[in-house]
Amino acid sequence: MSDGDSFADDPERVELLREVAEDVRGDSSESEQLAAMLYRVSDLYDPDEETTPAEIYRNVRNILDIKERGGLPERD
């Protein structure tokens, strides 16, 4: 299967991934992170989004890096 075939537009998959993201989203930072990652992955199958697996990887890596540093800095 080529990359083009594996990430074809799939509105049902988008809806399922986003529903799961909403279900796991909770009060903990870990559940928020997981929800954000699922939502980003759903973008691969959304015809209205233009993204690649590499872009999603970088975004998820950024989420994990921010968590490792203790979160985003406070704004004044």
Image: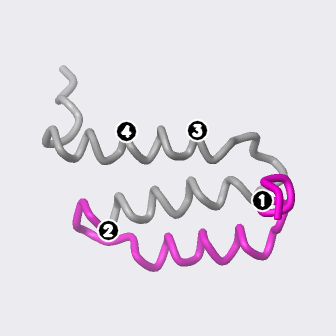
The residue labelled by disc 1 is 7
* Nearer to the camera, 4 or 20: 4
Q: Name the image quarter holding residue 54.
A: top right
Badge nearest the viewer, 1 or 2: 1
How far apart marks 3 and 4 lie (CA) works out to 11 Å
Residue highlighted by disc 4: 62
Point out residue 62 in the picture as x, y percentages from the top left corner.
Answer: 37, 38
Q: Secondary structure at mark 2?
A: helix
- Mark 3 vs mark 4: which is more N-terminal? 3
> How dense is the environment of label 4, judged by Cα within 10 Å: few (below 14), some, or many (20 and up)?
few
Do the numbered discs 1 and 3 sit on residues whose CB atoms are within 8 Å? no
**Counting residues from the N terminus, which is met first, the one under dot 1 or under dot 4?**
1
Q: Which residue, given by chain and number where applicable, does mark 2 sit on?
A: 31
- Region in magenta: 1-30
Find the distance from the CA under tag 1 to the CA under tag 4. 22 Å
- Check whether the beta carbons of the residues at disc 3 and disc 4 lie within 8 A of each other: no
The answer to which of marks 1 and 3 sits earlier in the sequence is 1
Badge 2: few (under 14), some or many (20 or more) residues near its Cα, within 10 Å? Answer: some
16, 53: nearer the viewer: 53
Q: Secondary structure at mark 3?
A: helix
Mark with earlier residue (1, 2): 1
Residue shown at the point (18%, 45%) measured from the top left: 68
Residue type at tag 1: Phe
The amino acid sitting under disc 2 is Ser
Tell whether position 19 is magenta: yes
- Crowdedness near tag 1: few (<14), some (14–19) or many (≥20) residues, C-alpha within 10 Å: some
Pick whichever of labels 4 and 2 is earlier in the sequence: 2
